[in-house]
């Protein structure tokens, strides 16, 4: 087990009153560990191990040439959005053989980010299916790998994504870009909560 290096960042503020559990999910090698590592205020916990030849017959490595490590449990990080709101981030493993861990990670989760590589959108279908099955709100973030660009409409159509689910672009290597993704999720969750409260208002 290894911890990723990180620059010194501020400790958790004493004014923090609201902690929200957020999960980052997606296919193998789409940038989940990179996003948690980039945006975390603390040195993130990474359960990464070196990939070996033993996994070549199990994991499909054709689309992730050059990848040498893989998450075998989950990544964990933390970011303070303001003086009161803190997000606890859990990055889920992407390989199919570790998907059984996802249901446990989803427990107590307020919302999720589905990180996608537009070169292989089909790798994101399972994540979306599981979140919908759990009733967990989510947004979709398209990670920029520098390949051919797809329009938002093309991505929505490929993922069969309803118009009410936000779709944003990001660079998981960038702290600011990753933070914008998390802010988009929080805004989405707030909008859902507001709409739910309005529908339950007897007036």
Image: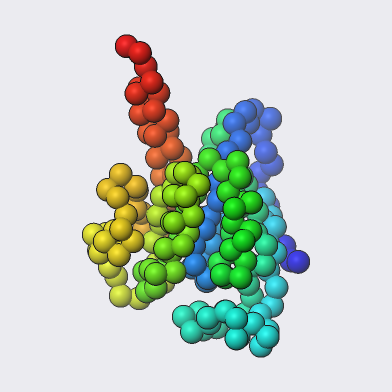
Task: Give the image location of residue 98, x and y in percent.
Answer: 62, 66
Task: Give the image location of residue 165, x and y in percent.
Answer: 34, 47
In the rendered view, tell whether residue 140 sits above or below residue 93.
above
Quarter of the figure with residue 153: bottom left
48 left or right of 25?
Answer: right
Residue 6 appears in the figure: no
Q: Which of 96 and 81 is in front in this view?
A: 96
Task: Give the image location of residue 168, x and y in percent.
Answer: 36, 54
Tell me the residue at 70%/73% (across/down).
Answer: 49
In the rendered view, tell whether residue 58 sits above or below residue 165.
below
In which quadrant will I find the N terminus? bottom right
In the rendered view, tell whether residue 83 sits above or below residue 101.
above
Residue 97 appears in the figure: yes
Tell me the residue at 59%/56% (across/down).
Answer: 102
Quarter of the figure with residue 84: top right
Instruction: Residue at the far front: name it.
Output: 133
In which quadrant will I find the C terminus? top left
Q: Nearer the viewer, residue 18 or 157?
A: 157
Tell me the residue at 47%/59% (across/down).
Answer: 127
66 left or right of 180?
Answer: right
Quarter of the figure with residue 141: bottom left
Instruction: Residue at the far top: name it.
Output: 203
Task: Give the image location of residue 124, x and y in percent.
Answer: 43, 64
Q: Nearer the viewer, residue 8 or 82?
A: 82
86 left or right of 138?
Answer: right
Tell me the residue at 55%/46% (across/down).
Answer: 22
Report the coloring of the rendering.
rainbow
Counting labels gives 0
């Amino acid at each position: 087990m290894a911890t990723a290096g990180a620059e010194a960042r501020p400790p958790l503020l004493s004014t923090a009153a609201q902690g929200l559990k957020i999960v980052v999910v997606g296919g193998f090698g789409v940038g989940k560990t990179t996003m948690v590592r980039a945006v975390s205020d603390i040195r993130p916990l990474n359960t990464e191990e070196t990939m070996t030849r033993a996994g070549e017959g199990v994991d499909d490595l054709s689309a992730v040439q050059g990848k040498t490590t893989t998450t075998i449990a989950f990544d964990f990080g933390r970011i303070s959005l303001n003086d009161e709101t803190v997000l606890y981030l859990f990055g889920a493993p992407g390989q199919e053989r570790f998907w059984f861990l996802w249901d446990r990670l989803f427990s107590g989760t307020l919302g999720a980010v589905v990180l996608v590589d537009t070169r292989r959108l089909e790798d994101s279908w399972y994540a979306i299916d599981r979140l919908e099955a759990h009733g967990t709100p989510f947004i979709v973030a398209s990670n920029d790998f520098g390949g051919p660009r797809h329009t938002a409409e093309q991505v929505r159509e490929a993922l069969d994504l309803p118009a009410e689910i936000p779709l944003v672009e990001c660079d998981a290597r960038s702290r600011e870009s990753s933070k914008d993704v998390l802010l988009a999720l929080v805004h989405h969750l707030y909008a859902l909560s507001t709409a739910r409260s309005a529908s339950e208002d007897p007036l």
